[in-house]
Amino acid sequence: MSLSNLQIITKLKNASDGLLWLSESDYPFETVLWSSMENLTNDKLLQKFKRSPDTLVEVRDIDRFFARATTESDWHDQSEKVEVEKYRQLVEILKTNLTDIKVYRVGEIEIDVYIIGKTPDGSIAGLSTMVVET
């Protein structure tokens, strides 16, 4: 039995609570839920957020995006190991509840990130955050 959109969003909100995506600035995750966007394209994403059509959009694989956050290192202390496990659980919740997951990086320097996929009813759900790269 598949979960409702509200249940999926609640799971994502709980799993991402307290996590910050580390870049030159650290940003929290926010949940996103959109009605179905058939054949989501870069152009449709830019239109949704009223961004210029020439805005850079990069699409990444979820595992590649989260690789650094889900990989434990020998030098990690206990709190860092706990955080790695939280990220692993977050990725598992995304993969278990969403299909066709992609990570969209929109813009340059201050980059909006959308980690989104399809829910069982065809809606788009996931997480958003920001990355700063100078």
Image: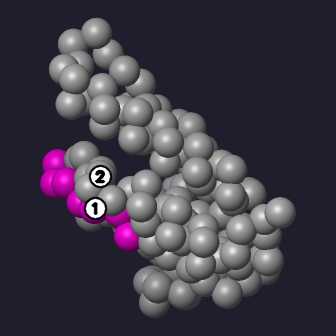
Tell me which amino acid carries mark 1. Pro
For marks 1 and 2 on the same chain, the one whose residue lies earlier in the sequence: 2
Q: Nearer the viewer, residue 19 or 42?
A: 19
**For the point 60% across and 72% down, which residue is it?**
7
Mark 2 lies on residue: 19
Mark 1 lies on residue: 28
Q: Residue furthest top?
A: 74
**For the point 31% across and 37% down, which residue is it?**
83
Q: Looking at the rendering, in which quadrant would you find the N terminus?
A: bottom right
Can residue 108 be seen by looking at this rendering? no
Q: Residue furthest front?
A: 1
Tell me which amino acid carries mark 2. Leu
Mark number, residue 46:
none
Q: Is residue 34 left or right of residue 134?
A: right
- In contact (CB < 8 Å): disc 1 and disc 2: yes
Q: Position of residue 85 (x, y in %)?
A: 40, 33
Q: Is residue 27 magenta?
A: yes
Mark 2 residue element: loop
Q: Position of residue 58 (x, y in %)?
A: 52, 56
Can residue 92 be seen by looking at this rendering? yes
Q: Position of residue 75 (x, y in %)?
A: 21, 13
Q: Is residue 7 magenta?
A: no
Q: Quadrant of residue 71?
A: top left
In magenta, the rendered stretch is 24-30
Q: Nearer the viewer, residue 64 or 90?
A: 90
Q: CA distance from mark 1 to mark 2?
A: 6 Å
Mark 1 residue element: strand
24 w.r.t. 41: above or below: above
**For the point 65% across and 49% down, which residue is it?**
95
What is the number of callouts on the image?
2
